[in-house]
Image (cartoon, helix red, strand yellow):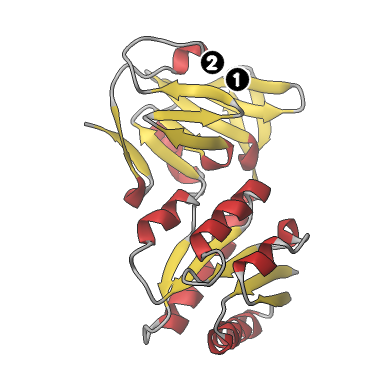
Amino acid sequence: MIRIAICDDEEIFRYKIEEILKDYFKKRQLVYSVDFFESGIELINNNGIKEYNIIFLDINMEGINGIETAKKIRKISNDVFLVFITAFLDYSLEGYKVHAIRYILKDSGKMPEAINECMDTILQEANKKFLKIRIDFIEGAKVVPIDAIVYVESNLHKLNYYVNTIEGIRDYTQYTTLNKVENNFPKTQFVRIHQSYLVNLKYIKYIKNYKLTAFLLDLWDYSTESSKEVLPPKVVLHSKILIHFVSLRITKY
């Protein structure tokens, strides 16, 4: 069952979103459930946030707005898909910072079409997320959960995969290029921050002052040309980086 929360202080839009979803799931014969919340505070105080697969959030709400609500949700769960539905465009940049999968305008005549496209994308990404892939490593072929791959580093004509296991971070090597394997990963979960690095957003704790932190440890430090102690040490990039949230990419300048 797909569990959905709709958080909006306007009742008319809560039920409008539900009607669109009802039609979407009926056509696809999928089982789902919907819970309604009138405010961000009510949603956050709900102890079952981790149980939701998708949360639709209005932005302009009293108490705490949708952006602040999303930030609190992300402290609880990195797995839930967040969808902003609002009458305002002003916060679109903020939406990317909490890894919202879509930003949909309420008063648009194409709202049903936009929600349907959003749901198609979510279901595709969800399927990929829980998939396991077989990779022919130099160390031997392994079946690896995509979600467990922290990042992939390109080094000439080989790739180093850093995988989260019960024994800690393990690294494996494959002879291929990042361009050839990039499309095997969900685009909403993995970001090509540099020509040599593909990073799983799930493991990013925060980005601040050109410094990306994950696992409570520093993976990259873009602020200086000098190396710092990182995990692993060779991941330090010796070039300045511009963080560009609009495209969710970090590119050289």
Say whether disc 2 or disc 1 marks the residue closer to the N-terminus. Answer: 1
Report whether 120 appears left or right of 30.
left
Tell me if residue 120 comes above or below residue 75 in the rendering. below
- Disc 2 and disc 1 in contact, CB within 8 angstroms: yes
Q: What element carries label 2?
A: loop
Q: Residue at x 44, y 26 (%)?
A: 176
Say which of 191 and 204 sits in front: 204
Instruction: Between residue 244 and residue 132, name the one nearer to us.
Output: 244
In the image, what residue type sits under mark 2?
Pro
Compare residues 55 and 170 and report the one nearer the observer.
Answer: 55
C-alpha span from label 2 to label 1: 10 Å
Of circles 2 and 1, the one toward us is 2
Q: Which residue lies furthest to the left in this view?
A: 253
Residue 94 placement: quadrant: bottom left
Q: Quadrant of the N terminus?
A: bottom right
Q: Name the residue under label 1.
A: 171
Crowd class of label 2 (few under 14; some 14 to 19; many from 20; radius 10 Å): few
Viewer-proximal residue, 94 or 231?
94
**Up-down: is 125 above or below 27?**
above
Q: Position of residue 98 (x, y in %)?
A: 50, 51
Q: Mark 2 points at which residue?
A: 232
- Tell me where residue 232 appears, x and y as whole percent: 54, 15
Which residue is pictured at 77% across the width and 27% down the height?
A: 166
The vertical placement of 221 against 64, above or below, is above
- Could you tell me residue 125's position as x and y percent? 55, 56
Q: In this view, does 247 lie above or below 91?
A: above
